Amino acid sequence: MYFLQASTDLDLKGLLLGAEEWDFLLEAAIRTLIMFVVLLTGLRLLGKRGVKQLSVFELVVIIGLGSAAGDPMLYKDVGILPSLIAFSLIVGLYKVVVYFIGKNKKFEILVEGKSVCLIKDGAFSIENFKKEALGEDEFFSELRMQSVSQLGQIEEAIVESSGSISVFYYPDDEVKYGLPIMPGALDAAVETIKDAGNYSCIFCGYTEKINPVNKMTCPTCSKTKWVKASNKKRIR
């Protein structure tokens, strides 16, 4: 009985239109058309930098443009003219910032950040990695998507200011033993080395040939967990 009463009292018009009247649908369509053209024009003015993989600065600009264009499409009390002013100001600020980015390297680093080397010669650049908001699992996933199965395949890996990862590989005949990064590879980490072989530190990727020993301390990071290293080549 309560359900039937609730269904009867349902304000279908309020559900569909909110506080607006039916004639606002046509106005909303016109507003959307106008702001769509403005948004398209604005993105064209930004150039290719504004639509490639985004840096933090470019993402802020795109969000600002979306907000300036989106509100007047849907809200009757938001006029188009103030939105156009905000839109134009954002585009103008973008142009000014890009100009100074091209003139001053320090300003560019301040606004967009800089590229950072995360892997060098098949091992982690630990201090650089600590500074990046990037989890190990996430990073390994990015590498696996580029057909990397172990760090000894990598001469250098760099996280760009846009967040993308650039990887430079050793030729197949120069691939070294390195830390395996396939799912579950680190679950077999041990402190006691029972069999002689090539092992990798699971914390920093340092790799060397180790003879049987009760406890081996990594000379790079002082950690004591090791897994058997891999020397697999990339499958392309």
Image: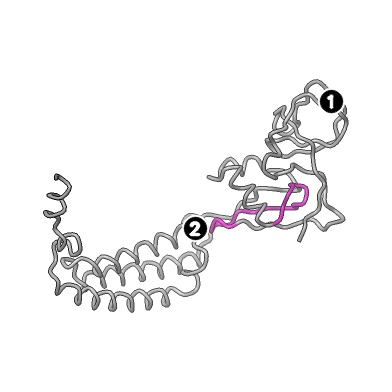
**Magenta highlight on residue 161:** yes
Determine the residue positioned at 68% across, 57% down.
Answer: 146
Magenta stretch?
147-164
Front one among 196 and 82: 196
The image shows residue 221, relative to residue 46, as above or below, that is above
Q: CA distance from mark 1 to mark 2?
A: 48 Å
> In the picture provided, is 148 more to the left or to the right than 115?
right
Please identify the quarter of the rendering in which residue 123 is found. top right
Determine the residue positioned at 46% across, 66% down.
Answer: 100
Q: Position of residue 10 (x, y in %)?
A: 14, 55
**Magenta highlight on residue 113:** no
The residue type indicated by label 1 comes to: Lys
Front one among 183 and 41: 183
Determine the residue positioned at 29% across, 74% down.
Answer: 35
Q: Position of residue 64 (x, y in %)?
A: 34, 63
Give the quadrant of the N terminus. top left
Q: Position of residue 227 (x, y in %)?
A: 76, 34
Please identify the quarter of the rendering in which residue 70 is found. bottom left
The residue type indicated by label 2 comes to: Glu
**How many other residues sit within 10 Å of disc 2, few (<14), some (14-19) or many (≥20)?**
some
> In the picture provided, is 131 more to the left or to the right than 144?
left
Give the quadrant of the C terminus. bottom right
> In the picture provided, is 166 more to the left or to the right than 101?
right
Residue underneath mark 2:
112
Residue underneath mark 1:
194
Front one among 179 and 104: 179
